[in-house]
Each structure stands twice: as C-alpha cells, then as structure tokens.
Amino acid sequence: MDTGEAIAALGDQVEAVGRLGQPDAGDEQSFEQVGDLLFAAVNVARRLKVDPELSLRASTARFRGRLEAAEEIARNAGLSWNELDIDQQLELYARARMAED
C-alpha cells in the first residue's frame, strides 16, 4: 500500500465512523470502527515517515496550550470557563487558535 492508498483508506475509515450515529459506550461496532480509524491514521503516519506517537504528543501539547489560552481569555473577560456552555467554550478556543497563527 502506497501513501495515497493509505490516505484513501483513512478517508474510508472516517466515513465509516461518521455513519455510526449517536455514541453508545457499549456499542461494539463503534469500538471497532474507532480502532480501525486509529490503525489507518498510524499507517498514514508510517508512510509519511512520521512517528505517530511523537506527532500525537505534539498535537496534545498544542491542544492543551490552546485550551489554557482560551481559559485565560475567559478569565480576562471576567468569565468562569466551567460556567460557559460548549458553544462559548468553542468560540474562545477558536479565538485562542487564531491568535496562535
């Protein structure tokens, strides 16, 4: 399987997960589909000669930094992060992400 085929397989897995519907913690099909999605993503990383674990760690660090920045934006506006609804939190996260660029 070449890189293009690996990317296409990843796209197929994303579509399959998207068709699952509502999340259900006990749903074996969801469990298997997410596992297949992760496996396909790791395969793409290998084909691109990217260490998937290091890449995930870096992504997690970026996410945490953005989340901390979003929480700071909320504090500076006199808001409590935990009292914001999900849409407000996502808006502040988007602002933090844009400020990063």
Image (spheres, rainbow, N blue to C red):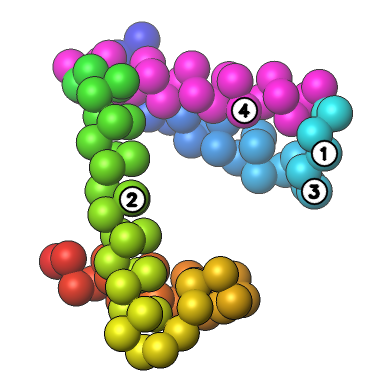
Q: Is residue 43 left or right of residue 85?
A: left
- What kind of residue is marked 4? Val
Does label 4 or label 3 sit earlier along the sequence? 3
The type of residue carrying mark 1 is: Asp
Q: Is residue 82 above or below residue 78?
A: above
How packed is label 4: few (under 14 Cα within 10 Å), some, or many (20 or more)? some
Which of label 1 and label 4 is nearer to you? Answer: 1
Indicate the position of residue 44 as horizontal and vertical percent values.
33, 22
Mark number displayed over residue 63: 2
Q: Are marks 3 and 1 in contact (CB under 8 Å)?
A: yes
As helix, strand or loop, the secondary structure at mark 3 comes to loop
Report which residue position mark 4 lands on: 34
Give the x, y percent position of residue 2: 29, 14
Q: Left or right: 70 with respect to 39?
A: left
Per the model, the C-alpha gap separating discs 4 and 2 is: 20 Å
Quarter-of-image position of residue 41: top left
- For residue 24, which numbered disc appears in the image? 1
Q: Which residue is mark 3?
A: 22
Label 3 neighbourhood size at 10 Å, few (<14), some (14-19), many (20+)?
A: few
**Dot 2: few (<14), some (14–19), or many (≥20) neighbours within 10 Å?**
some
Q: Residue at left 24%, top 36%?
A: 58
- Residue positioned 19% across, 73% down in the render: 99
Circle nearer the viewer, 2 or 1: 2
Tell me the chief SS of the magenta region.
helix
The crowd level at tag 1 (other Cα within 10 Å; few <14, some 14-19, many 20+) is few
Asked whether disc 4 touches disc 3, contact meaning CB atoms under 8 Å apart, the reply is no
**Label 1–label 4 contact, CB within 8 A:** no
Q: Which amino acid lies under the numbered mark 3 shown in the image of this protein? A: Gln
